[in-house]
Amino acid sequence: MNIKKYLFLSLISFGFASVNAQNAQIEPLEKKDLFKKDAITFYIGSGTMPILDTLGDAVKKNLLSSFPEAKMNVSSPFIVGYQYHIRDKFSIGMVYCSSSVTSDTKTMPDFQNPGKNSEFYYNIALTSLMTSVDVFWKKIKRPKSTFAFHSGLSLGLFNLTGSREIKSGTGNGVEDLNLNVTSKAMQLTVVGVKHSMDALKGFGWFANLGIGFNSIGLTTGINWTL
């Protein structure tokens, strides 16, 4: 091959490469919908439950009246669940929630055994397990992430337990707390948003505004969509 033919073929090859490079640059990035049909989103988060403060105040007032300095330690609701998209705009799933309020440890003399003491604390736990149905009414798809706005309803059961825990001693003279209630539970999500990013392998965050047995007000956390 002579030099002229070689230069001619080189220029043609360079021209095709330049055109392909320009097309690759002007081609819009794909807007991937991470919340599509058959997608599964797992999530974990926390919220607020004002009833725990009310229950803690009742325990302090009635069972710890001899300990005015007693403190009630509230554990914020721990929420974990998943959503399966049976349609692009509808999902079903399960959600579990656990929260509690616990008093600090107190010491009371055992009057039946002089010189002996009993260490104790009170604990109230609230748990729930519910099925959920959500409607995704707005999606914002960006080149590398997706925002999905939704509303939903969860129905199931809750269990409220209360107990007196003896750490040491006989517990003589310490008032008992025997509480165990199971009934229907509900959680209404007025509006929520879930976010997922391609760069983070589908991880993102969520925020829900709702009311029910899992949380009252704002619930936030992280989610993973696959």
Image (cartoon, rainbow, N blue to C red):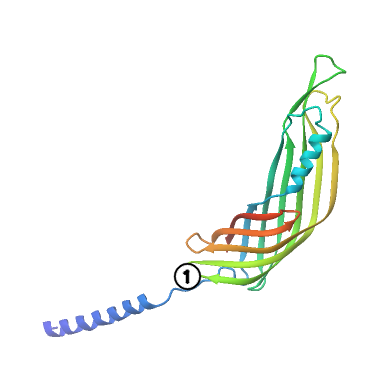
Q: Residue at x 68, y 52 (%)?
A: 79
Point out residue 125 in the picture as x, y percentages from the top left corner: 76, 43
Q: Residue at x 67, y 57 (%)?
A: 81
Point out residue 86 in the picture as x, y percentages from the top left corner: 67, 71
Q: Residue at x 49, y 64 (%)?
A: 198
Q: Mark 1 packing: few (<14 Cα in 10 Å), some, or many (20+)?
A: few
The C terminus: image quadrant:
bottom right
Depth check: give the residue in front, 104 or 226: 104
Instruction: Look at mark 1 in the image and give the residue it sits on.
Output: 143
Q: Quadrant of residue 179?
A: top right
* Amino acid residing under circle 1: Pro
Depth check: give the residue in front, 218 or 27: 218
Q: Residue at x 65, y 55 (%)?
A: 219
Q: Regarding mark 1 in the picture, which secondary structure is present there?
A: loop
Question: In the figure, is residue 23 to the left or right of 79?
Answer: left
Question: In the figure, is residue 10 to the left or right of 29?
Answer: left
